[in-house]
């Protein structure tokens, strides 16, 4: 039961961070993670994005559409096979994720501890 309470605390810390992140950047946490993923791997298919973010294909499709509407990513249609699509950061998307990465974020203490453990 103690583990369940710890999971609840982590979930609340993430929710608090996401609220602050949304207010500051007008991006959901998934949208921000998509930008980070495309910064690290510049061309990905929707399936690769789904796998990288651990989302269903349906949720990934909605996420891609949302970030496209914000003009932060663009579709690249295959030259040989027009059905083969990749997604890449736009100039605005690169600027946005670079600004986010260079900013110090006020994370709840619990999340700071978790991130610290992950960095080791």
Image (cartoon, grey):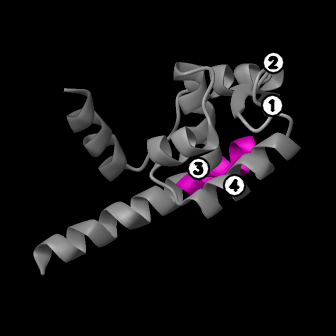
Marks 4 and 1: in contact by CB < 8 Å? Answer: no
Can you tell which of label 4 and label 2 is closer to the viewer?
4
Disc 1 crowd rating (10 Å Cα; few below 14, some 14-19, many 20+) is: some
Determine the secondary structure under disc 2. helix
How far is the residue under mark 1 from the one under mark 4?
Answer: 13 Å
> Which of these two is toward me, 114 or 89?
89
Can you tell which of label 4 and label 3 is closer to the viewer?
4
Dividing the picture into quadrants, the one containing residue 113 is top left
> Which of these two is toward me, 64 or 76?
76
101 relative to 114 in the view: left or right: right
The residue where tag 1 is placed is: 74
Is residue 25 shown in magenta? yes
* Numbered label attached to residue 30: 3
Tell which circle, 1 or 4, labels the residue nearer the N-terminal end.
4
Tell which circle, 4 or 2, labels the residue nearer the N-terminal end.
4
Tell which circle, 2 or 1, labels the residue nearer the N-terminal end.
1
Q: Residue at x 31, y 51 (%)?
A: 110
The residue where tag 4 is placed is: 61
Q: Which residues are magenta?
A: 18-28
Main secondary-structure element of the magenta-colored stretch: helix
How far is the residue under mark 2 from the one under mark 1?
Answer: 10 Å
């Amino acid at each position: 039961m103690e583990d369940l309470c710890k999971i609840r605390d982590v979930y609340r810390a993430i929710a608090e961070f996401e609220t602050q992140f949304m207010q500051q950047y007008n991006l959901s946490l998934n949208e921000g993670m998509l930008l980070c993923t495309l910064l690290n791997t510049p061309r990905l298919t929707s399936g690769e994005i789904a796998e990288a973010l651990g989302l269903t294909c349906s949720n990934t499709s909605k996420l891609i559409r949302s970030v496209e509407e914000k003009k932060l990513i663009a579709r690249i249609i295959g030259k040989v096979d027009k059905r083969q699509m990749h997604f890449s950061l736009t100039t605005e998307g690169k600027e946005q994720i670079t600004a986010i990465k260079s900013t110090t974020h006020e994370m709840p203490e619990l999340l700071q501890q978790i991130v610290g453990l992950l960095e080791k």
